[in-house]
Structures are given as C-alpha cells and as structure tokens.
Amino acid sequence: GAVVSQHPSWVICKSGTSVKIECRSLDFQATTMFWYRQFPKQSLMLMATSNEGSKATYEQGVEKDKFLINHASLTLSTLTVTSAHPEDSSFYICSAGRDRGFGYTFGSGTRLTVV
Amino acid sequence: DAKTTQPNSMESNEEEPVHLPCNHSTISGTDYIHWYRQLPSQGPEYVIHGLTSNVNNRMASLAIAEDRKSSTLILHRATLRDAAVYYCILGLLGAGGTSYGKLTFGQGTILTVHP
C-alpha cells in the first residue's frame, strides 16, 4: 500500500534555530503533499499545500517566511521551521494522495519541541 | 468549505458494532466523504471514502444517505485497537480528477471501546 515516511519523528531544538522536517512518499509519486499542525487535544490544522516544482500554497494566517516548504521532487517535500520559538512546539504531520481510489496517506508525524 | 458535524464522543463495548454518524448538510455534488482515524501521537489513518453509494472494505463500511446530507461509518465488531478519534471530512477532487484537494479536519469523534 501507499506509504508516507516522515522524518524525524521527534526533535528538540533551541529557540531561534531552524528545523527541517522531511516527508517522503515511498512507493508512489505525489505531485501534491499537505502539511498539518496539531496542538495537544486539538484537531489537525492545515498549514499549506505543497506542489511539486512550484510554490506552496499557504492557508490564511500561516507565515510563509517562517514555514518554508520545498517540494523539489515527486517523492519529497520538506517543511523548515525557521527561527523557531516555543509557541511553534507542536505535532507536524504531512500527507500525500496517491489517487482517488486510495484516499490520502499520512506520515507518522514529527513532535517538535522548542526550548 | 463544506463542514461536517460529529458527536464529540461515543462509547462501545468490544465485539459489538459501532455506528459513527456524520452530518454534512451543505455537501456539494462533487464532495467525496472521507473517514480517517487517529491514535494518540500518530498521523491519521485512512479508513474509507465514498461519493454516493455505500462502500465496504476490510476495515469498515460507509453508509451514505440518499440525499448525501449524512453518512455513517460502521465498524462491524469493535476491538480495543479501534479506540481512536474518527474524522469525517469532505474532500473535493483535485485538478485532473485523479486525486483529492485539501482535506479540512473538524474535531472528530473520540471513540472509547470497553473490554
């Protein structure tokens, strides 16, 4: 079945540093990937749509200069949290769609803690 | 985006069927009905999706009302591993009709399964 690998699964960083999270589709090509953020006891919030070979589309209220998204190939999208602050601590999840027969596959998530 | 309404929580006993309802009265003709579930500290897992007809797979069944304003996810025999947050989401077909556009998560239903 369709597998999406997300790495790292958890990361702790110092305030002011940048962190990169990778999302790979292992057995299918994904022209579109999605990035979500989830705070404790809350639902997933869509941050942006990552498009292969073009700029990402950000949801309203998401700072594109802070959350840099790169989708350089059909199997890899990255999210870089720049100048991280404690309020950026969250669970970040990516997803990719294979085709309409399969719905979406989600990565296992990345727990980011900014200290 | 068309929204969905789900009960905040439901309980079931192991080995019994579970019917998880979802209302989507503003659904459009091109909206697919998706169900995902999420265990703590994990990414969501695809359960099932459909457009108009009832759907069955190895995990669950999806019963869609004739007017498509509501649907029910049916777990035929609940197990302890089915305890999760279940999300009912409406998703449009993406460009080209081969995959879906973005999915917007609501609060979902917390399913508790008792031994």
Image: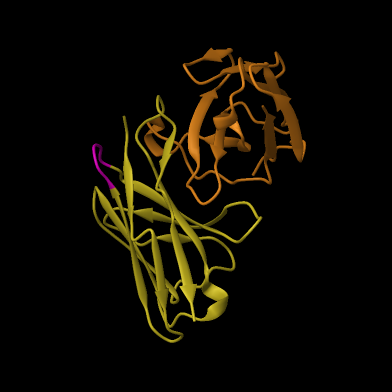
Chain colours: A yellow, B orange
Q: Quadrant of residue A110?
A: bottom left
Question: What's drawn in magenta, residue-wise?
Answer: A25-29
Reply above or below: A82 against A25: below
How would you classify the magenta stretch by its main secondary structure?
loop
In the picture, the quarter occupied by the N terminus of chain B is top right
Reply above or below: A40 against A67: above
Rendering coords of residue B5 (x, y %): 75, 37
Rendering coords of residue A109 (x, y %): 43, 54
Q: Is residue B65 left or right of residue B101?
A: right
**Residue at x 40% of width, y 24% of height:** A101
Reply above or below: B114 against A80: above
Rendering coords of residue A35 (x, y %): 45, 56
- Residue A86, can we see it? yes
- Residue B20, can we see it? no
**Residue at x 65% of width, y 17% of height:** B64
Q: Quadrant of residue B68?
A: top right
Rendering coords of residue B91 (x, y %): 55, 36
Reply above or below: B53 against A83: above
Viewer-closest of A31 and A88 = A88
Residue A108 among magenta residues: no
